[in-house]
Image (cartoon, rainbow, N blue to C red):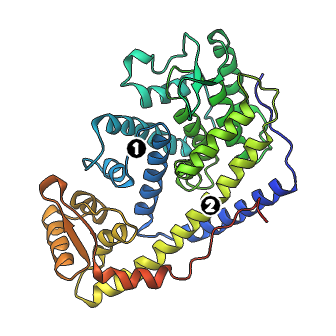
Amino acid sequence: MLFDVPSLDDRDARALHEIEEMRTRLLHMLRPELRWSGQLRRNLTARAIAGSNTIEGYAASVDDVEALLSGAEPLHASEETRVEVEGYQRATTYIHGLSDAGDDFRYDTGLLNGLHFMMQGHHVTKRPGRWRKGPVYVTSPEDPTVAAYTAPEPAQVPALMGELVAWLNDGDLDAPVHVRASMAHLNLVSIHPWPDGNGRMSRALSTLVFSREALMPAEFSSIEEWLGYGQNTYAYYGVLQEVGGPSWDPTRDAHAWIRFCLGAHHRQAQMAGRRVDLYARIWRELTEHAERTGLDERVAFALMPAAFGTKVRRPVYQHDADISEQSAVRDLRELVTQGWLEPHGNARARHYTAAHRMAPILENVTRAMPAYDDPYRR
C-alpha cells in the first residue's frame, strides 16, 4: 500500500491553474530560438543540482556546478562535494534525456536502481543500485541522535517498490502532473529503499515525472533549487515529518504535502518566468551596448553570467560562444579593459565578475520586478 493522492480543495485548484498559466506563458516565451536559452537551462539545472545536494550537506556553489556541466574544473568545491555533484549531474542529464524516450517508455525497478547507481556508485560499501538489507532511520535535523522517521522493514521494500513502479506507469494518470510528481517524491522518500541517497533520488524522480510529460523542459519545473534555500529546507523536513509520521504509515493524509509542493511549484514557476524575462531583457541591453563599443555581440555570453552574479570562467565562455581559446582570451581581456568585467585570481582560479560598466544596465532592467506571490496567503 502507498500514500493515496489526496482530494484537492479550491485553493489547490487555484494554485494549479495559476501554475499552468505561468507554464503556458513560459512556453510562448521559449518558443523562438533564443541564443541565450542554453545558458539559462544550464543555470537552472545547476541551481537544481546545487539545491538538492545542499539539502544533504554537500554545499556546492552554482558557479562550480555550472563549471562541471560545461566540462571545466570547479573553483571551490571540495573533492567530496565534487564527487557527489558529479554523480547527481550524471543522473540529472539522463533524466532530462528521457523526455524524448518515446511512448513505449516504462518505469521499472532497474531504471530506478540504475539512476541510484549513477548518483551513489562511488559509495561502494553502501550497495549503490540495490535495495537495502537493513533498517533505515531518518534522523531529526535538530538532533541527529533522534530517529524522526523509521522506514518500512527491508523485507517489504521489493514489493513496495514494485507497487510504486506500477503506479508510476498506470496509477492516477488523470491527476495533474504536479500532483503525480509530488506523490512519487513522497512515496519514494517514505519507502527509503536504499541505504543512502534516498532524498536526492526522490527529488530526482519528481523531476523525471516532469521530463516524461515533455510539455516543458524539466529544468523549468524542478523545485530542487527552491527546496535548497535554508528556511525552505527546514519547512521541507517539517512537512515530511508531519505527513510521514514517526514510521511508515501510508494511511496518513498527504494533503499537507501536496499543498507544500504546489506552493513550491508556484514560486518556482514565478522564478523561472522572471529569469526568462530578465535574460531576454539583459541580453538585448548587453548586445546593444557591446556593439556600440566595437565588440562582437558574442561577448554577451560572458556578460550574462556576470549580470546574474555568477563567476565567468574562460573555458565556460569559450564553450558557450563556440570560439577558440585565443578568441576567448582576447574577448575577456577587452571586456576588462572597457570596464565590463573585473578579473580575480590567476591560472586555473582565474575568473571574472561584473564591473562598474554593468551596474546601470542591471539597475535599469531589474528595477520594475514585482514581489513574489504565495497562492495560499491571499
SS of the residue at dot 2? Answer: helix
Left or right: 269, with 115 as reference point? right
Q: Nearer the viewer, mark 1 or mark 2?
A: 1
Residue 164: give x, y in percent of width and height: 69, 26
Mark 1 or mark 2, which has the lower sequence index? Answer: 1
**Number of other residues with Cα within 10 Å of mark 2, as a class: few under 14, some 14 to 19, many 20 or more:** many
Instruction: Look at label 1 and name its amino acid.
Output: Ala
Of residues 315 and 100, which is closer to you in this image? 315
Residue 75: give x, y in percent of width and height: 25, 50
Q: State which quadrant residue 375 falls in.
A: bottom right
Residue picked out by circle 1:
59
Image mark count: 2
Q: Farthest residue toward the bottom? A: 292
Residue 269, numbered circle: 2
Quarter of the image where the C terminus is located: bottom right
Q: What residue is drawn where x is 75% and y is 48%?
A: 259
Q: What residue is drawn where x is 51% and y is 17%?
A: 130
Residue 138 can be seen in this image: yes
SS of the residue at dot 1? Answer: loop
Left or right: 14, with 278 as reference point? right
**Cα–Cα span, label 1 and label 2:** 24 Å
Instruction: Look at label 2 and name its amino acid.
Output: Ala
Q: State which quadrant residue 334 falls in.
A: bottom left
Quarter of the image where the N terminus is located: top right
Residue 167: give x, y in percent of width and height: 73, 30
Above/below status of 240 relative to 307: above
